[in-house]
Image: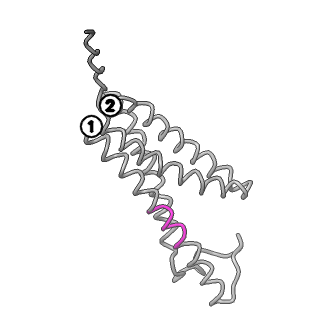
Amino acid sequence: MRTAYKALGHTIAGFVAIQAAAIALWVFGMLNWVDQEKGSVSKSVSDDRFEGVTGSIGIAIHSFGAMIVALLAIILLIISFFAKIPGGVKWASFVFLAVLFQWVVAIFAFEAPGLGALHGLNALVIAWLGWRAAKQANVTEATPAPEAAVV
């Protein structure tokens, strides 16, 4: 269980990096498309016009990856109860809560775009928490130091 816990923590951190790369691919691909096509993006643009947009796969990867990260966070939390890692439940809970917060921020960012910055910042927090949870798997119960002999 300890190995699974550690692997999940690292995997979550890795998937967050993939998420960041995917959304950057999409944004820069879209900007390139607008620049090259001298076009603009609005709700009135049909999906057909976006065919061939460099990086359009990025948004699909980002969306699918969000579901994977959420699933991994749930699995990490479940495993944390059985792994007997000191502080393991605490760190898995932090990961889960940060991922839950990420979803809430993402949903509301469509109405308040400034929250997008918080979404990006929280992604870094999730990556760090995943790494930190994985590091916790190396912690073992501390044995008390032997008492000094009285002479």
- Per the image, the residue denoted by label 1 is 2
In screen coordinates, is 36 left or right of 2? right
Name the spot of residue 21 as percent of width and height, x first.
48, 67
Occupied quadrant, residue 104: top right
Q: Mark 1 Cα within 10 Å, few/some/many (few <14, many 20+)? A: some
Q: Assess whether mark 1 and mark 2 are in contact (beta carbons under 8 angstroms).
A: yes
Give the Cα separation between the discs numbered 2 and 1: 7 Å
What residue type is disc 1 on? Answer: Arg
* SS of the residue under disc 1: helix
The mark tally for this picture is 2
Type of amino acid under label 2:
Ile
Q: What stretch is highlighted in magenta?
A: 18-25
Which residue is pictured at 69% across the width and 54% down the height? 115
Task: Give the image location of residue 60, x and y in percent.
Answer: 49, 65
Report the front residue among 67 and 10.
10
Q: Is residue 149 above or below residue 14?
A: above
Does residue 40 sit above or below 91 in this rendering? Answer: below
* Point 65% across, 87% down: residue: 35
Label ID, residue 85: 2
